[in-house]
Amino acid sequence: MAIKIFKNFFKRIFFSIFKNKKDIKLGFYGPPNAGKTSLANRICKDFTGEEIGSVSKIPHETRNIEFKEKVEISYKGKKMVFKMIDTPGIATKIDYEDFLKYKMKKKDAKNRAKEATQGVIESIKWLDDMDMVVIVLDATENPYNQVNITIIGNLVARKIPVLIVANKVDLRKADIKKIEAAFPEYDTIGISAKYGTNLEEFYESIFKLTKKL
């Protein structure tokens, strides 16, 4: 009887120690073509040798939730394991005619618009499963828009730790200060996912954000 009680006690202690050792679910959110997949690809390639998804100049290339399990990120001697989750770009309106500008056939454009709309719905649903979220914004675009407000609003409601990334700082029109002014309550990191600029500061901010979990 005493042995059984001891075993049960040990089992409870064991699970209490390891129940919080699951991979941290890190979601990448933002408007279309801001560079979510480019950033996720660079991180995954650096630490796993594989990319998470494909990129394109055509909006809504990512129309389904994409995963990469067991991404162990190392920074200054520390290691943390993440489940990387790349999401379709959030948009308040998706019109098939926008895709015709990229010389897509009308049928293909309509299908892409339909899939992209469903992808937006799935992105919002998946917020409930996120531990942390990186919001990727195009630093050359005006951050004061309905899409960004919608994303931030959903995150505030769920009390999810957030890091804002101002991507494309390699471009002349990039303006990080405008993004910082738009969302002063969050840390903003300027990077170039294309060239890997400032990723060290990004990793430092990610590790810092995990302390809020």
Image: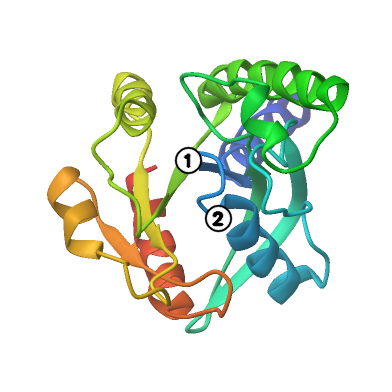
Label 2 to label 1, Cα distance in Å? 8 Å
Q: Nearer the viewer, residue 30 or 159?
A: 30
Residue 102 % position (x, y): 72, 43
- Residue 150, image quadrant: top left
Q: Are marks 2 and 1 in contact (CB under 8 Å)?
A: yes
Q: How many marks?
A: 2
Q: Nearer the viewer, residue 9 or 106?
A: 106
What residue appears at the point 78 percent right and 51 percent down from the top-left corner? 53
Residue sticking out furthest to the bottom? 76
Q: Tell me if mark 1 has few (under 14), some (14-19) or many (20+) residues whose alpha carbon lies within 10 angstroms of its own.
A: many
Whether residue 7 can be seen here: yes
Residue 136 % position (x, y): 45, 50
Residue 57 % position (x, y): 67, 53
Image quadrant occupied by the C terminus: top left
What residue appears at the point 72 percent right and 42 percent down from the top-left corner? 61
Q: Amino acid at mark 1?
A: Gly
- According to the picture, the residue beneath numbered tag 1 turns out to be 30
- Residue 165, image quadrant: bottom left
* 86 sits left or right of 190 in the view: right
* 184 sits left or right of 70 in the view: left
Whether residue 184 can be seen here: no
Image quadrant occupied by the N terminus: top right
Q: Which mark sits nearer the N-terminus, 2 or 1?
A: 1
Q: Nearer the viewer, residue 106 or 209?
A: 106
Q: Amino acid at mark 2?
A: Gly
* 143 sits left or right of 83 in the view: left
- Residue 174, image quadrant: bottom left
- According to the picture, the residue beneath numbered tag 2 turns out to be 35
Q: Nearer the viewer, residue 58 or 12?
A: 58
What residue appears at the point 77 percent right and 18 percent down from the top-left corner? 110
* Above/below status of 59 relative to 82: above
* Above/below status of 162 relative to 98: below
